[in-house]
Amino acid sequence: MSGGDAQTYYTDNDLVERFSLAADVNYFARVETRTYYGTEPGEWCKAWEPRYGQVNGDDIYADIHAIALEAGLSPDRRWLAYAKYGYCTGSALYNYAQPLLCLVDLNSQERTCRSDVGYHDPTFAPGDNTLAFAANYTGQYEIWKATVSADGSLSNLTQLTRGASGLWSRAPAWSSDGNWLIFHRDTDPSEGESLKLCAVQSDGSKLRALNVSGGEPAWYGGGSAPPVIYDHFIYLPLTLRNQ
């Protein structure tokens, strides 16, 4: 978006495609796969481990044996958030009844995991410790936001979306100025899925369907105006900067 040429940032055959960069791009969070073998022939399982550290350097934090996805890093590199589905030790594979929301204080390495409801897709706002995520507080997944406090607890919990029964929402992504979130909503109330993109302001106002099919969106730009839709393309207000 800045007009520069794409360059290789990090290479690892075990890297999962979703990762998170902080303002200091020398550090990043990602999920990597690891295969563990048990003591008996044929015993094995694959872990999806959230990791944080310097690019091409040693890991500062890793949740070994975890089955996790959707790692999000706060802009100041204080917090790592991820949804944890279970764990794998080679001889044992255990899946939780619903995904946990884990928050790690990267200064102290202390981890707190919430299991009160199911959680998915945690992502930090670009400017502070506001965390957006999908959570099942109301009987289906909706988009929520909260402030991560100094002790790892969540405060100022705010519901941003309210879909009709069976029309859940997931995969929030912040606009780069923090004014909007884009996400996908299932528009098929049956057991099938028909994902459409929607947008909502960060205070929960001006929620609107974008009438575009898609999932796991991202948004560079923002401002006070919503995205403008032409046919099947999303034209987002962008701020371009020269390198």
Image (tube, grey):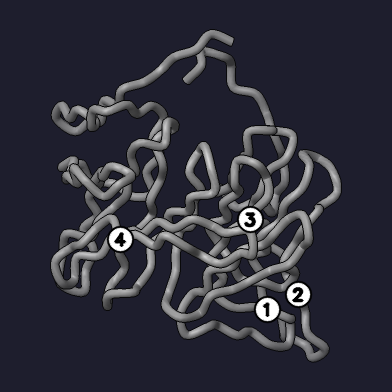
The image quarter containing residue 211 is top left
- Separation (CA) of disc 3 from disc 1: 21 Å
Q: Which mark is residue 36?
A: 2
Which of the marked residues, 4 or 3, is nearer the chain's N terminus?
Answer: 3
> Which sits in the foreground, 227 or 180?
180
Q: Is residue 158 above or below residue 29?
A: below
Which of the marked residues, 3 or 1, is nearer the chain's N terminus?
Answer: 3
Q: Nearer the viewer, mark 3 or mark 1?
A: 3
- Separation (CA) of disc 4 from disc 3: 22 Å
Q: Nearer the viewer, mark 4 or mark 3?
A: 4
- Separation (CA) of disc 2 from disc 3: 24 Å
Which of the marked residues, 2 or 3, is nearer the chain's N terminus?
Answer: 2
Q: Which structural element holds mark 3?
A: strand
Q: Which mark is residue 80?
A: 3
- Which class describes the residues within 10 Å of circle 4: few (<14), some (14-19), or many (20+)? some
Q: Nearer the viewer, mark 2 or mark 4?
A: 4
Query: Percent from the top left, x then y, of residue 62?
Result: 75, 61
Residue shown at 44% from the left, 32% from the top: 176
Q: Amino acid at mark 3?
A: Leu
Query: Percent from the top left, x then y, of residue 222?
Result: 34, 29
Q: Is residue 242 above or below residue 128?
A: above
- Separation (CA) of disc 4 from disc 1: 33 Å
